[in-house]
Image: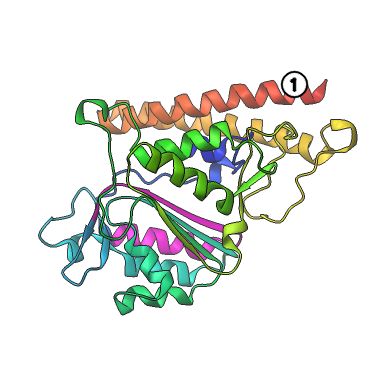
């Protein structure tokens, strides 16, 4: 998802705006981190969770951490109430939650005003969109155990493939109102659980990605996440505008800085004997290097 969101030809988020929190151990630290990030976000706030979803005795959705106790999820898991407060505290114009976990549809109940009152209060958050991998009483689908080391969860894999291939016949920029029907059809046709969604105001019109199936997309011309209403029209004659050329130059510099930092982090992890962190950092480094090569190629094309 980090690579997809920061792909300049698709979602176009600046790499430093995509923060990966992998296998957090402390519920309190994660809750504080999410709240602080939400308060700092003024454009578009996106929370994408992939993991286990569990339900408390009060039927409240909790996002499970590696330390979550199955018998006490309300204490050891990240309660949806915490995420609700993070969303409420954010000045972001658009707030998006994508939940790839079991029972994730319970977050939908929060926006529709049904179910537990603590969940129903989330309906007060305007400009929000929630997309879930399953309905409130359904488990999400995962590949067989022997495939999980190299495969995404089913929902995330379908969403990823949809964005990469695009939707023929749709506009140059895909909104959630475009994406959801196609995603639902793909999943249900294969016999997987149906996703669900709910939005307030016009959040479903946020342009999430360039339509890879469109012939009119100009490379590196996706809108910045903090500017969902920006005009993506390329300059006359198909030539990149000065703004797009500057964006290409800046992207290369940002990715180069990111590569240098990841190399330093990798060296530190290896020196400390932290094999898990070293492996995770090495995977991130591989992805960023691939993005850098693509960005350099695009910059060269723009210069010529």
Residue bearing the label numbered 1: 300
The x, y position of residue 99, in whole percent, is 38, 53
Residue 130, image quadrant: bottom left
Residue 274 seen in the figure = no
Answer with left or right where residue 215 lies relative to residue 202: right
Answer with left or right where residue 293 lies relative to residue 59: right
> In the image, is residue 63 part of the stretch drawn in magenta?
no
* In the foreground, 196 or 38: 196
The kind of secondary structure element at disc 1 is: helix
Answer with left or right where residue 75 lies relative to residue 90: left
What range of the chain is rendered magenta?
28-53
Asked if 14 appears above or below 92 in the picture, the reply is above
The x, y position of residue 68, in whole percent, is 18, 54
Asked if 224 appears above or below 112 in the picture, the reply is above
Residue 214 seen in the figure = yes
Q: Residue furthest right?
A: 236
Identify the residue at horizontal 72%, vertical 39% (top origin): 221
Answer with left or right where residue 62 lies relative to residue 172: left
* In the foreground, 30 or 75: 75
* In the foreground, 33 or 133: 133
> In the image, is residue 49 part of the stretch drawn in magenta?
yes
* In the foreground, 158 or 5: 158
Identify the residue at horizontal 39%, vertical 58% (top origin): 33
Asked if 301 appears above or below 92 in the picture, the reply is above
The x, y position of residue 79, in whole percent, is 28, 65
Residue 211, image quadrant: top right
């Amino acid at each position: 998802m980090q690579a997809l969101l920061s792909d300049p030809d698709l979602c176009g988020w600046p790499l430093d705006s995509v923060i990966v929190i992998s296998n957090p151990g402390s519920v309190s630290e994660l809750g504080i981190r999410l709240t602080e990030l939400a308060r700092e976000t003024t454009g578009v706030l996106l929370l994408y969770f992939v993991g286990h979803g569990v339900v408390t005795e009060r039927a409240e959705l909790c996002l499970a951490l590696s330390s979550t106790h199955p018998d006490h999820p309300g204490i050891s898991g990240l309660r949806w109430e915490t995420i609700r407060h993070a969303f409420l505290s954010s000045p972001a114009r658009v707030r998006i939650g994508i939940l790839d976990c079991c029972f994730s549809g319970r977050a939908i109940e929060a926006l529709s005003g049904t179910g537990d009152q603590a969940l129903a209060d989330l309906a007060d958050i305007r400009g929000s969109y929630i997309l879930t991998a399953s309905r409130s009483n359904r488990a999400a689908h995962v590949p067989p155990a022997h495939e999980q080391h190299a495969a995404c969860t089913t929902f995330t894999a379908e969403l990823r493939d949809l964005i990469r291939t695009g939707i023929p016949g749709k506009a140059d920029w895909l909104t959630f109102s475009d994406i959801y029907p196609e995603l639902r059809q793909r999943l249900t046709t294969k016999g997987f659980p149906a996703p669900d969604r709910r939005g307030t105001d016009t959040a479903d019109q946020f342009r999430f990605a360039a339509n890879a199936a469109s012939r009119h997309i100009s490379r590196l011309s996706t809108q910045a996440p903090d500017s969902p209403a920006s005009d993506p029209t390329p300059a006359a004659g198909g030539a990149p505008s000065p703004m797009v050329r500057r964006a290409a130059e800046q992207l290369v510099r940002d990715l180069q800085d990111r590569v240098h930092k990841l190399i330093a982090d990798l060296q530190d992890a290896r020196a400390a004997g932290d094999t898990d962190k070293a492996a995770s950092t090495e995977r991130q480094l591989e992805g960023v290097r691939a993005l850098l090569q693509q960005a350099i190629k695009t910059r060269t094309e723009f210069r010529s």
